[in-house]
């Protein structure tokens, strides 16, 4: 399987991202915690540059005893990538669309070797 150099691992601090070309396609590469994730840089909605969007926790409702909404909070367990065009959200670990988990961004495998990070195509 072909490999494309995404950069040196020291270039990626936690939360950093980089857009690289893999086989003629734009791919966004993220470091989140100690994991690397790579997805095609194209939102499933209208083709926007999803990799350029905000990274934030999933919005979760906090309900009271009678199921009334008390407040909303950002999750620290499920992190989303938000497309800058229309706000479609994707789980950063799986690429699954928050609105329909059956739909996912195209995922690429990554490989860390000898201080370099590669995207497999």
Image: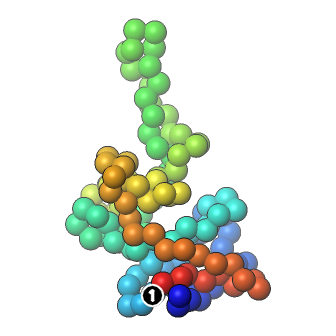
Q: Left or right: 96 with respect to 78?
A: left
Relative image position of residue 32 (x, y in whole percent):
62, 61
Q: Residues within 10 Å of mark 1 (few under 14, many from 20)?
A: some
Task: Answer with the quarter of the image where residue 31 lies.
Answer: bottom right
The residue at the point 53 percent across, 46 percent down is 78
Q: In this view, does 44 lie above or below 96?
A: below
Relative image position of residue 24 (x, y in whole percent):
38, 90
Q: Mark 1 points at which residue?
A: 21
Relative image position of residue 114 (x, y in whole percent):
77, 85
Q: Is mark 1 on a helix, strand or loop?
A: strand
The residue at the point 45 percent across, 14 percent down is 64
Relative image position of residue 9 (x, y in whole percent):
70, 78
Q: Which residue lies furthest to the left in this view?
A: 46
Q: In this view, does 26 lie above or below 33?
A: below
Indicate how the structure is coloured in the image: rainbow
Number of numbered discs visible in the structure rendering:
1
Q: Which residue lies furthest to the front in this view?
A: 1
The residue at the point 33 percent across, 52 percent down is 102
Q: Does residue 82 appear anywhere in the picture? A: no
Q: In this view, does 3 lie above or below 27?
A: below
Q: Does residue 5 appear anywhere in the picture? A: yes
Q: Left or right: 80 with respect to 98?
A: right
Q: Residue furthest right?
A: 114
Task: Answer with the quarter of the image where residue 77 lies.
Answer: top right
The residue at the point 72 percent across, 83 percent down is 113
Q: In this view, does 85 lie above or below 56?
A: below
Task: Name the one closer to the observer, 85 or 114.
Answer: 114
């Amino acid at each position: 399987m072909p490999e494309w150099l995404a950069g040196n691992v020291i270039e990626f601090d936690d939360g950093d991202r980089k857009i690289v070309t893999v086989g003629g396609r734009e791919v966004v590469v993220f470091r989140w915690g100690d994991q690397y994730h790579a997805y095609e840089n194209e939102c499933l909605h209208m083709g926007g540059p999803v990799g350029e969007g905000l990274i934030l926790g999933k919005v979760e409702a906090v309900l009271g005893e009678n199921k009334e909404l008390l407040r909303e909070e950002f999750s620290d367990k499920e992190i989303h990538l938000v497309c800058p065009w229309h706000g479609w959200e994707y789980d950063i670990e799986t690429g699954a669309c928050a609105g329909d988990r059956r739909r996912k961004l195209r995922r690429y495998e990554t490989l860390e070797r000898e201080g370099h990070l590669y995207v497999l195509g």
